[in-house]
Image (cartoon, rainbow, N blue to C red):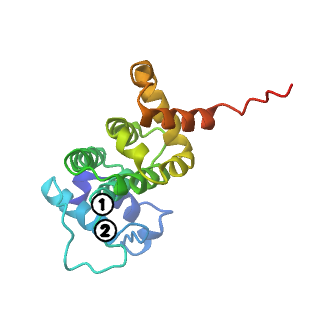
Amino acid sequence: MLSIRTSFFTDATKKAGFLESKDDTVTMEEHSAHAVWRLLMYCYTGDYRETNNADITDESTVHDAYLKHIRVHALADMLNIDSLKILAVEKLWLSIRNNWDVRLFIPCVKETYATTNKRDKTIRNMLVMAAHKNMAQLVERKGFVEEFQDMGEFTVEFLVHVAPSLNSIVNRTSFGVLVQVLISQIAPPVNNSA
């Protein structure tokens, strides 16, 4: 059944050079047990549950409404299952749209940018659009400026996304702070002593 969704397991257990080919066993220790459980559910049903499996008791249990989808996406990316990556992005978008929580968003962005390839624009662009949509709440969050300064790739992609709308919203107070952060990330300090 797994081979219908991905060739990863067949390749890993049958091709020489893979450690798994020696004993027909594939281990995924770097991924959460819940993400693997959701992968298996997807392979058999074409969907996965957002609730956690009560039978899985590992230390990486995620109760975060956003991170569970990021972790499924990362696993799907490793296994080259594009349809599961799309499903994870759709579920993440719905979760963010219907249950926006500024406290969950920053860790979500950080983990996404740490676990995705720069060319994987679908999930990254979705997070940039979500940040744009909820920009006022993000900027008003205590500590956001410092967090935002540490997220280089996301900051640049966000600026590129919001640049067309800068003229229409530059006078909004919360946006003024964001513009200062973005400028400090891109432009070197000006030395007026010359």
Q: What separation in Å lies between label 2 and label 1 (alpha carbons)?
A: 6 Å
Q: Residue at x 15, y 52 (%)?
A: 46
| Residue 85 versus residue 12 in the image, above or below | above
Disc 2 crowd rating (10 Å Cα; few below 14, some 14-19, many 20+) is some
**Is the residue 33 above or below the residue 155 in the image?**
below
What residue is rendered at 24% in x and 52% in y?
5
Q: Mark 1 Cα within 10 Å, few/some/many (few <14, many 20+)?
A: many
Q: What residue is shown with label 2? A: 62
Q: Nearer the viewer, residue 50 or 36?
A: 50
Circle 2: residue type: Val
165 displayed left or right of 44: right
Query: Residue at the left extreme?
Result: 45
User: What is the quadrant of the C terminus in the image?
Assistant: top right
Task: Please identify the quarter of the rendering in which residue 55 is found.
Answer: bottom left
Q: Secondary structure at mark 2?
A: loop
Q: How many numbered discs, if any? A: 2
Q: In the visual, does 155 lie left or right of 15?
A: right
- N-terminal-most mark, 2 or 1: 2
Q: Residue at x 62, y 33 (%)?
A: 186
Q: Are marks 2 and 1 in contact (CB under 8 Å)?
A: yes
Residue at image position (37%, 35%) is 132
Vertical arrangement, residue 34 with respect to residue 104, above or below: below
Q: Can you give x and y, in whole percent of width and height, for residue 52 in the image? A: 21, 69
Q: Nearer the viewer, residue 99 or 143?
A: 143
Give the camera-side residue of 180 and 99: 180
Q: Quadrant of residue 181?
A: top right
User: x%, y% of residue 173?
Assistant: 43, 33
Residue 73 position, x and y percent, is 33, 52
Across and down, in percent, residue 118 comes to 49, 41
Residue ranking furthest to the right: 194
Q: Which residue is mark 1?
A: 68
